[in-house]
Amino acid sequence: MAQAPNYTAYHPRWLRRRVSTYWWLGSWSYFAFVLREASCLFVAWFVVYLLLLVRAVLQGDASYQQFLAWSARPAILLLNITSFLFLVYHAFTFFDAAPRAMVVHIGKTRVPASLIAAGHYLAWALASAVVLWILLGHR
């Protein structure tokens, strides 16, 4: 018969509760956290997609047309739409966390978190407007 280990005051028995693999399904905040972390994969996909586009453009018109045909496939289109939604979610959660992570002072006064968030959203809106202006053709 096996004997139980001898614990002393200097070697206590550790209390380790078992954690389920699906711990993140226990509450909305955990789920949102894991969803945000998973959104990084879709951000990475957009980087890869953009690099593939640049390569196709640099290789000439035939390669670019082939890339466009590949991009028009339903699976790639669905992946890009899903990635875009995750990218927007990633940006919103980043802008939500930024005021808590950034402590900005003007003199001895702390800038309110709402102003920090508003600055981020304003910069995003301006960058989006510039991209839209470029895509629609500035005249």
Image: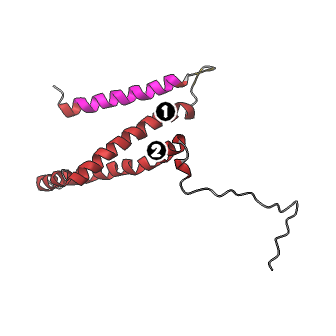
Q: Residue furthest left?
A: 62
Q: Amino acid at mark 1?
A: Asp
Q: Amino acid at mark 2?
A: Arg
Q: Residue 36 appears at what percent x and percent y?
A: 46, 44
Distance, label 2 to label 1, CA atoms, is 12 Å
Question: Could you tell whether 67 is left or right of 13 in the image?
Answer: left
Observer able to see residue 136: yes
> Quarter of the image holding residue 129?
top left
Q: Element type at marker 1?
A: helix
Highlighted range, magenta? 114-133
Q: Which mark is residue 120?
A: none
> Quarter of the image holding residue 124?
top left
Crowd class of label 2 (few under 14; some 14 to 19; many from 20; radius 10 Å): some
Crowd class of label 1 (few under 14; some 14 to 19; many from 20; radius 10 Å): some
Q: Residue 39 appears at what percent x and percent y?
A: 42, 47
Tell me whether circle 2 and circle 1 mark residues in contact (CB < 8 Å).
Answer: no
Q: Nearer the viewer, residue 120 or 104?
A: 120
Which quadrant does the N terminus fall into?
Answer: bottom right
Q: Which residue is mark 1?
A: 96
Q: Which residue is mark 2?
A: 36
